[in-house]
Amino acid sequence: MVAVAITAHDLMVETRGLTKHYGNGIVAVDRLDMRVRRGEVYGFLGPNGAGKTTTLRMLLGLIRPTAGSATVAGAAPGTPASLMKVGAIVESPAFYPYLSGRDNLRALAIYSGVAASRVDPALQQVELLPRAAHRFSTYSMGMKQRLGIAAALIKDPELLILDEPTNGLDPQGMADVRGLITELGKGERTVLVSSHLLGEVEQMCTRIGVIRKGAFVAEGTIEDLRGAATLTVRAAPAEAAMRVLVAEAGPDSVKVADDGAFSVTVDVARTAEINRKLVQAGVDVTELAAHERSLEDVFIELTGGEAGL
């Protein structure tokens, strides 16, 4: 496969050595290098307290980094050129409880210099239009979260930044918001979503970055981070099985366990093909099982099993 070069135009977010220290000696973010590509749903994954929210606040210009730099939507964080292309929820969205959902968004549109005509389409996108005239104080937790996402959408942004968008929701609410984010990430819009919930990230995201104690420990697709699958093969005669497995997977990918079983590192999609090759070679296969590392396995390995999941 030929690697495709990623240009500056392809990146909606790029950080270079982004760092945030506080006066009490806490290093909240430590030399972060992150690249979020245009048109993807990027999961920013880490335990609670790992530095996710601090990073997002720096990307939005809400706080200044101690060192390093970032480019967000083609401009410096917090500048008008960047913010006009970005919609965000960082921590819990806040609205006037006595105003309706629609009037809350109208007030925000006026403050942001956005046409009022954008309010109803944003409400439609998050399926709140039927309740748009109801007071915010009557909304369920899931509806409040969806109104927050609608607020982030009124500018029709190229980049959507969502900080723990399913926090505090019941399972149905989590599923609803997860489906909404998946839909919002289709097409040209880029979504950067932080979470400490492995299942959420696995179901929504194209690529993920993992942060631990303020430092980036991995970035890539879920498949890349999981690595290749392992096949456990029990077959006889062993010599003939070894020849077939080495021919199919390469000598460095085949190991023999103490109990005589073969462990083969290979693409799991080739399981049936390898079984067919063994049978065609006159090998009797008594076991052929694929084992893939879960995202949870990868996360525990990368973060040292920190609490906060």
Image (tube, rainbow, N blue to C red):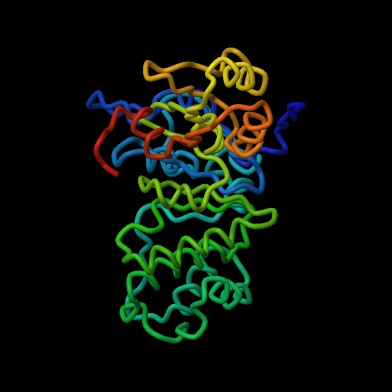
User: With respect to residue 61, does 166 lie above or below?
Assistant: below
136 or 222: nearer the eye?
222
In which quarter of the view is residue 56 placed? top left
Residue 93, x across and y down, in percent: 38, 62
Question: So how many labels did they put on this image?
Answer: 0
79 or 300: nearer the eye?
300
Q: Quadrant of the C terminus?
A: top left
Residue 102, x across and y down, in percent: 48, 79
In which quarter of the view is residue 261 placed? top left
User: With respect to residue 255, does 204 lie above or below?
Assistant: below
Q: Quadrant of the N terminus?
A: top right
279 or 265: nearer the eye?
279
In which quarter of the view is residue 207 placed? top right
Q: Residue at x 43, y 31 (%)?
A: 65
Q: Is residue 221 left or right of residue 107?
A: right
Q: Residue at x 48, y 28 (%)?
A: 234
Residue 78, x across and y down, in percent: 52, 44
Residue 258, x across and y down, in percent: 37, 16
